[in-house]
Structures are given as structure tokens and as C-alpha cells.
Image: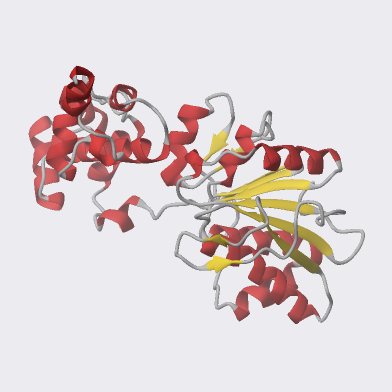
């Protein structure tokens, strides 16, 4: 199981960097290992960076990283991590998939940082395993892999599979691993050096709480918004929302106007549109499928609402020409 006490030192980890990977996820894994070595005075961890073609790869922030090993050079590994970031839905590499499956057969723990969960899923390495992924990519992941059990936890460790939601969650995952392998005292020392005042466990939430995100603490208003977020594909009626919160529809309207300066319908619509944008950018779902997944009854109504809110149509969001242009092309 990933995180068990090691039988030998150092534990060797290969981190596969996918184009546009998240640099904060990478450093949040490497730095705890480096600091554990430094604080303990022993080489507890070793790591290698690999790219799929052996060439330098650029993170989503624009900084280029050079690999320190190739697939062939990375042998006798204890752990393999796939680190990716934006545009992961466009990435596919059979060589990587084959290598990951080979490392699995050799007994390595296989895991993912941030959106790397999607790469493991496509390689068939998450079947019958619980996993997590960054909250922005959760809806897209559920659409592509409905059969895989996915959570909203900070990180998940399921036998020899581990996944991390990304960002600083990777730091907490590694501090938990250091605790398991070398004791709480060392993990606290590492966290202290990084001025990380609390080691979160996997049950902590990925996102800030609703009160923190909205700057609102009215319990009934928050309960309604939570209901909205849980029911985007099949939106609840205003009457239904009010009834669940123990309010009249007039009271519901007043709460939203007072605290958020908008109507319940407007807030609900914006939640659905924001979800639709993530699906448009992170999946290959058709526009009508995105519309239906976000509670819109027709592509035309969805397109109008999307354009009014974001200033561009769903097709424009994807860099596609308008349908009218396609029809004109067919006539030529």
C-alpha cells in the first residue's frame, strides 16, 4: 500500500511531467521529500523527472523543465506519479500508458497529481479503485468515467493507487505519507519549515467553505445555495428550493437580494453556466450534451444564455466557427 513503511532507502519516485502540468503540484511533492532528507539527515527519498518524449516540457505557468531520466532509465522504482494540469483531455500517449501498466506489474505504487487522474483512468489503472481529482475537473471526469468511484477529498490512497486533487493538497498528501513512513515528528518538522501550520488529512475539503467563498453566513441562504450546487443537471424550482429551506418564495427572493444582490434564478443560472464552461473546456462533449448536463432544455437557449453571460457563444469558447460559417462552406 502506498505510504507503508519502506524496507529500503531511498524510496525512488519517478514523476512523469505532462505538457502544461501544474507546477505547484510538482513542487508540493518534491519539496517535502527534499526537506525530509535535509531535516532527518538521511537520504530517505530520491526522485526523477520524466517526459513522454525525453524532451523538455513546459508547465502551465510557462517555465520549462528538463527531464532527468527516460522511461528506459527509470527502473526499480518504488513509486510513479503522473503530474498534469490544464488541457489534459487533449493528451493521449500509448507509450506512457504501456509503461505505466508495466511499472504496475513490477509492483510500483502508481499515482497522479491534479488532473493526472484522467490519464490513469484512460490507461485502465483506476478500475476498482477510489480516486479524486481537482474540483474544477470533477464534472468532466464523471462524464467520461461514470463507472469509476471518484470523491471530492483532498487526496485518496487506495491500496497501491493514490490520487491528489492538486495544488497544495499534494503537500498535505506527502506530509501524511512522511508521517506513515517516518513518524509524525519528522512530518511536523517538515511542515514547520514550510510555515504550513496544519497538516490536513484526506477528509478535508478541496474548496473553501460556502461562507468563505460568498462572504455570507446566513444558514438558510447557504442551505439553498448548497442545494443548487448539488442539482445543476436537473435544476430545482424556486418553490422547491424555498420549501426545502423552510421559507416562502418571497422570503427566498429577499435573502438573495439582500446578501447577493441578485435573484435566486440568476444565481442558479450562473452556477449552471460556470459548470458548462468547465465541460466545454475540459471535455469533447457536444454542445447539446453540455447543455443537457447543465440543466438546459435546448442548445439554442443554452447558447443565448452563455453568450449573454460570457460574451461569446459555446462554439466560440472552443475556438470553433459559428454554425452559419459551416453551412456557407458546405454551399461553396
- What is the basis of the colouring in this image? secondary structure
**To which quarter of the image does residue 127 belong?**
top right
Q: How many marks?
A: 0
Q: At 50% across and 28% down in the image, what residue appears?
A: 144
Residue extending farthest to the front is 332
Q: Is residue 285 left or right of residue 132?
A: left
Residue 84 lies, in percent from the top left, at 55, 51
Residue 204 lies, in percent from the top left, at 52, 53
Instruction: Point out the image quarter for the C terminus.
Output: top left
Q: At 77% across and 47% down in the image, what residue appears?
A: 109
Residue 217 seen in this snapshot = yes
Q: Nearer the viewer, residue 116 or 245?
A: 116
Q: Is residue 73 above or below residue 37?
A: above
Q: Is residue 301 left or right of residue 1?
A: left
Residue 234 lies, in percent from the top left, at 30, 23
Residue 132 lies, in percent from the top left, at 56, 42
Q: Is residue 86 above or below residue 332?
A: below
Residue 237 seen in this snapshot = no
Q: Nearer the viewer, residue 210 or 291?
A: 291
Q: At 72% across and 65% down in the image, what residue appears?
A: 68
**To which quarter of the image does residue 244 belong?**
top left
Amino acid at each position: 500500500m502506498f505510504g507503508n513503511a519502506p524496507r529500503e532507502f531511498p524510496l525512488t519516485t519517478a514523476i512523469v511531467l505532462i505538457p502544461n502540468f501544474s507546477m505547484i503540484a510538482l513542487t508540493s511533492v518534491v519539496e517535502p521529500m527534499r526537506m525530509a532528507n535535509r531535516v532527518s539527515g538521511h537520504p530517505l527519498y530520491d526522485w526523477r523527472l520524466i517526459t513522454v518524449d525525453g524532451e523538455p516540457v513546459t508547465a502551465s505557468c510557462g517555465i520549462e523543465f528538463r527531464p532527468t531520466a527516460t522511461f528506459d532509465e527509470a527502473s526499480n522504482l518504488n513509486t510513479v506519479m503522473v503530474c498534469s494540469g490544464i488541457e489534459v483531455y487533449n493528451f493521449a500517449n500509448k507509450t506512457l500508458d504501456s509503461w505505466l501498466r508495466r511499472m504496475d506489474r513490477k509492483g510500483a505504487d502508481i499515482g497522479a497529481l491534479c488532473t493526472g487522474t484522467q490519464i490513469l483512468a484512460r490507461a485502465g489503472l483506476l478500475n476498482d479503485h477510489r480516486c479524486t481529482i481537482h474540483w474544477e475537473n470533477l464534472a468532466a471526469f464523471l462524464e467520461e468515467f461514470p463507472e469509476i468511484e471518484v470523491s471530492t477529498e483532498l487526496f485518496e490512497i487506495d491500496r497501491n493507487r493514490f490520487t491528489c486533487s492538486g495544488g497544495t493538497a499534494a503537500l498535505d498528501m506527502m506530509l501524511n505519507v512522511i508521517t506513515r513512513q517516518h513518524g509524525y515528528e519528522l512530518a511536523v518538522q517538515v511542515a514547520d519549515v514550510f510555515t504550513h501550520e496544519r497538516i490536513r488529512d484526506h477528509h478535508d475539503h478541496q474548496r473553501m467553505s460556502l461562507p468563505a467563498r460568498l462572504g455570507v453566513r446566513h444558514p438558510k441562504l447557504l442551505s439553498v445555495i448548497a442545494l443548487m450546487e448539488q442539482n445543476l443537471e436537473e435544476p430545482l424550482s424556486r418553490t422547491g428550493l424555498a420549501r426545502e429551506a423552510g421559507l416562502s418564495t418571497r422570503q427566498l427572493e429577499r435573502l438573495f437580494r439582500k446578501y447577493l444582490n441578485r435573484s435566486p434564478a440568476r444565481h442558479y443560472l450562473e452556477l449552471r453556466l460556470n459548470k458548462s464552461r468547465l465541460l466545454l473546456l475540459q471535455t469533447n462533449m457536444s454542445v447539446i450534451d453540455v447543455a443537457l448536463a447543465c440543466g438546459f432544455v435546448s442548445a439554442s437557449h443554452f447558447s443565448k444564455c452563455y453568450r449573454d453571460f460570457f460574451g461569446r457563444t459555446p462554439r466560440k469558447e472552443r475556438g470553433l466557427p459559428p454554425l452559419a460559417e459551416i453551412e456557407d462552406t458546405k454551399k461553396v
